[in-house]
Amino acid sequence: MNIKDIRELILTIDKTNIQKVEIEEKDIRISISKSTLCENKNSQIKEEQVKQKIESEKNEKNIDHTDDEFYIVKSPIVGAFYAAPSPESKPFVKVGDEVVKGQTLCIIEAMKIMNEIESEVSGKVVEILVDNEDAVEYGQPLMKIRR
């Protein structure tokens, strides 16, 4: 499969209702997924999101990072936070849920790639620090889990 074939595949998938395609050939693996959300929501940072980011930074200063009782889930990349796999789906987790190590907590979309964020600890979700569809920064706290 060459670049021209891949480009043609992407354009073809973009014109369909297909949300995800994975192709594996000998030494090549291609995974393509597309967002079902409005592109404008992801491409523009609204004034409200900027205010929320400032508020989030204030909250981050109030979080005790040295407390062994709690684990802070931080965004590994810059992108858009999604609490559920699609707008119609239930959230991956909510406050009060018990989670296990390796369980998907949320999705961060970066450059139209959906990155599942998994829990690094087992415990109980005690606080979700961002709202669905918020723009998040690298290292920004997303959730607080009691170990």
Image (spheres, helix red, strand yellow):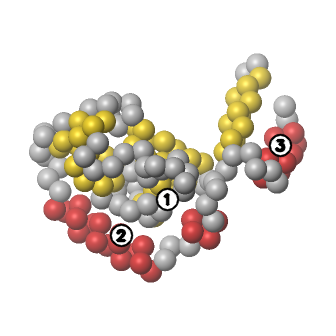
Q: Earlier in the sequence, mark 1 or mark 2?
A: 2
Residue 104, picture quadrant: top left
Q: Amino acid at mark 2?
A: Lys
* Residue at disc 1, secondary structure: strand
Residue behind mark 3: 9
- Image location of residue 83, percent across then percent down: 44, 52
What is the quadrant of the N terminus in the image? top right
Residue 110, picture quadrant: bottom right
Is residue 58 rendered to the left or right of residue 131?
A: left
Residue behind mark 1: 80
- How far apart are labels 1 and 2 at the CA level? 12 Å
Is residue 40 rendered to the left or right of residue 141?
A: right
**Residue appearing at x 85%, y 35% in the figure:** 2
* Residue at disc 2, secondary structure: helix
| Vertical placement of residue 111 versus 124, above or below | below
**Residue appearing at x 49%, y 77% in the figure:** 46
Residue 53, picture quadrant: bottom left
Please say whether residue 26 is visible from this viewpoint.
yes
| Residue 21, numbered circle | none
Residue behind mark 2: 53
For disc 3, the neighbor class at 10 Å (few under 14, some 14 to 19, many from 20) is few
- How far apart are labels 2 and 3 at the CA level? 37 Å
